[in-house]
Amino acid sequence: MFRPALTLTVSNAKTVLEDGLRAIGAGQVAFDLAEVTVVDSAAVATLLAWQRAARRKGTPLEFRNLPVNLQGLLELYGVAELLHAASPAEPRADLLHH
């Protein structure tokens, strides 16, 4: 299972995006975001890009353990349902976003 970096912001989105695309290319179908602690709007764009890549490949992609701050951004931008993200077992209110 692919696990992105601790942060997913504009400062590292390109690298994290490429890592995820390689994981999708290698057959990964689940991404675990439990360790992601800091996000901004670039995280939303990255998740959408990963999902597009998986769909082009004809494979499902599941996002697991989304931090509360990322869930909030997905709701804010109106894309939460597009990503069909699995909710975390327990909310993680301790996480920061920009």
Image: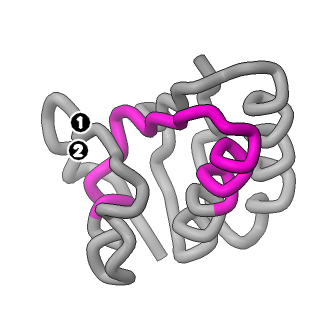
- Distance Cα–Cα, label 1 vs label 2: 8 Å
Regarding mark 1 in the picture, which secondary structure is present there?
Answer: loop
Percent across and percent down for residue 17 are 77, 52
Q: Are marks 1 and 2 in contact (CB under 8 Å)?
A: yes
Mark 1 or 2: in front is 1
Write the residue at 48% across / 76% down: 98
- Residue located 34% across and 49% down the image: 84
Mark number displayed over residue 32:
none
Label disc, if present, on residue 92 of the rendered structure: 2
Q: Which residue is mark 1?
A: 88
**Segment colored magenta:** 49-71
Amino acid on which the number 2 mark rests in the picture: Arg
Residue at point 66% right, 56% down?
52
Query: Among all residues in the image, which is located at the extreme front?
Result: 58
Answer with left or right where residue 86 lies relative to residue 20. Answer: left
Query: Label 2 neighbourhood size at 10 Å, few (<14), some (14-19), many (20+)?
Result: some
